[in-house]
Each structure stands twice: as structure tokens, then as C-alpha cells.
Image (spheres, rainbow, N blue to C red):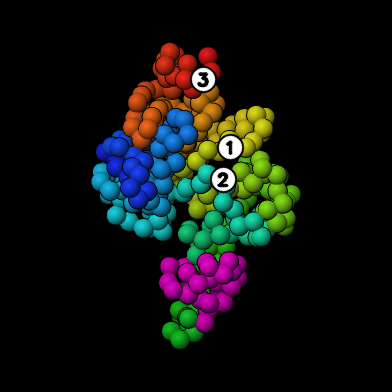
Amino acid sequence: MLQVRDLVAAYGPIVALHGVSLDVPEGSIVAVLGANGAGKSSTLRVISGLLRAKSGSIKFDGQRIDHLSTEQIVSLGMSHVPEGRQLFGDLTVLENLRLGAYSRFGQADGGGRLAHRQGLSLLGRLQHDLIQAATGGIRDLARAVREHGQRRRDFDAALKQIFDYFPILAQRKNQVAGTLSGGEQQMLAIGRGLMARPRLLLLDEPSMGLAPLVTREIFEIVQTINRTEGVTILVVEQNANLALEIAHYGYVLETGRVALADTSENLRKSEAVRRSYLGQ
């Protein structure tokens, strides 16, 4: 599904990636491990278009995407849950989830982008559609109503799915996101990424700052999402033990280069990995 070849990327004069290559087969969970500063988060940022590569290539389902904008990459079926959650802390849980759903259920025209920036509900977008359609006659108006109805049903189904995975979010749906616990915020960040119904989900340090029991719960849910929904997952993680428990394959980065690449089972048996990353 995802093929990354010889990526070189930098922040100004500081080179973060020195020719990183990796593969993420469809339906798999792939872990990227490494110490702080190894280039893990930079790899995800380049894949999702947040950081431009100086050279190398990225293919998603056979299509080159390294020249596309983040918005275009998301529209192809990829979601990125960034390090540190980066939620809209002043918005409610439900409003954050609505914004996550925009790329799938929103409009692609200029008015739709304005609605996205303002965080408008689907009802607000329907009003925009109806105003636009009124200039095209009753047939266009009827089509706008039908399309809105289908988007609403799809949105409700996606929202129900998130609440099934994370029941606490259903209880907190009207609570401001910034007042949630760290674990609840991470659940919301993952839920927001899933609202776009991605085929590939990028997770950056999902265990950061969380208690061990909460971390394990989140990783079990991630594994369930992969198994039941078939969502392919590329996860960057410092907790190598947990990451390798759920992953099928793994890469170890050191100073912006791939130092090791193997099945998760073999990496867990590797003396170098056990000594450096597994605390054994």
C-alpha cells in the first residue's frame, strides 16, 4: 500500500532523514522504532505532506504522492494522528470529531473550505448547498438535499463506530476537549483521525505521557481497528515492547537512517533491539 524510497528531508540546514526506505503492506501494522531524534516523526511528516522531502519518493497505492498537498493526500485515504494529539482544545469532543470527518463528508469548493475553517456543522453546509443550488433550479436543489441526507447518514455511522471503540467519548461528547484526561485526549485524537474513514492511519507516539494501563488499552483498540476494519497502520513509538506486540513488521531508525528492518517477532529476538529498546 505504501512504498517509501530513499527519503531525504531537512529542517533548514539540519538533515533529519538520510535516505529512509520502508514498505507498509495493505492490512498490516508496521512499527517505526528509535530513540528521540532518530527521525521517526519526521518520516511521518514527510509521508503526510507536512514536511517536504528534498529527494526520494513516496507511493500510496501505486500513485506518487510526494508532490501533493496534505489535503490531497488525506483525500486519497490517509489520516495522520500527530504527536502530542494537537486537538482543538476549546472545542467539544463532538466538534473535534466533526472536523476530522470534514475531508470525507464536506464540500470541496471554496465555500466548503470556509465552512471547515469556521468549524460549521453539516447543517451549516446544507444551508450553503441549498443557497448555491437555488441558482440552478429545483433539480439541483433536490440533488443537494439527497446528497446531504447521505452524508448525514454516513457521518452518523462513522460517529457511532468511534463511540463503539471509545465509549468514554460518547459520555464526554459535549465536554471541551482541553478538559479531558491525557488518555481521553489520545482516544479523541485517534477517533478524529478515523472519522475520515482512512485506509492508512499514521500514529505518532500514541503512548506519550500516558499511564501504562491506558497505553495498553489504546494499543489493544488500535489492534482491533486493524483486525476488524482492515485499516492499515503505520505507528511511530518509543514503547518498543508494546509496538512490537501488535505490529507485523518493524523498522528501527538511528540518526535518520534505517538501522534494522525485520518482522516484529525477529526484532523482539534481536540482541541489539533487546538491549537498546526493550530494556532487556
- The kind of secondary structure element at disc 3 is loop
Q: Quadrant of the N terminus?
A: top left
In front: 196, or 119? 119
Q: Looking at the image, tell me whether mark 3 or mark 1 is earlier in sequence order.
A: 1
The residue identified by callout 3 is 278
Residue type, numbered disc 1: Met
Residue type, numbered disc 3: Leu
- Asked if residue 109 is among those painted magenta in the image, a careful observer would answer yes
The residue identified by callout 2 is 84
In the rendered image, residue 22, in percent from the top left (x then y), is placed at: 33, 34
In the rendered image, residue 72, in percent from the top left (x then y), is placed at: 38, 58
Q: Looking at the image, tell me whether mark 1 or mark 2 is earlier in sequence order.
A: 2
Residue 156 visible (yes or no): no
The residue identified by callout 1 is 208
- The kind of secondary structure element at disc 2 is loop
- Asked if residue 273 is among those painted magenta in the image, a careful observer would answer no
In front: 220, or 140? 220
Real-space Cα separation, disc 1 to disc 2, in angstroms: 7 Å
Give the overall secondary structure of the magenta segment.
helix
Q: Is residue 213 left or right of residue 117?
A: right
Quarter assignment of residue 167: top right
Q: What residue sits 53% from the left and 77% below the top?
A: 128
Q: What residue sits 61% from the left and 43% below the top?
A: 186
* Residue segment shown in magenta: 107-131
Q: How many marks?
A: 3
- Mark 1, residues whose alpha carbon is within 10 Å: few (<14), some, or many (≥20)? some
Real-space Cα separation, disc 3 to disc 1, in angstroms: 16 Å
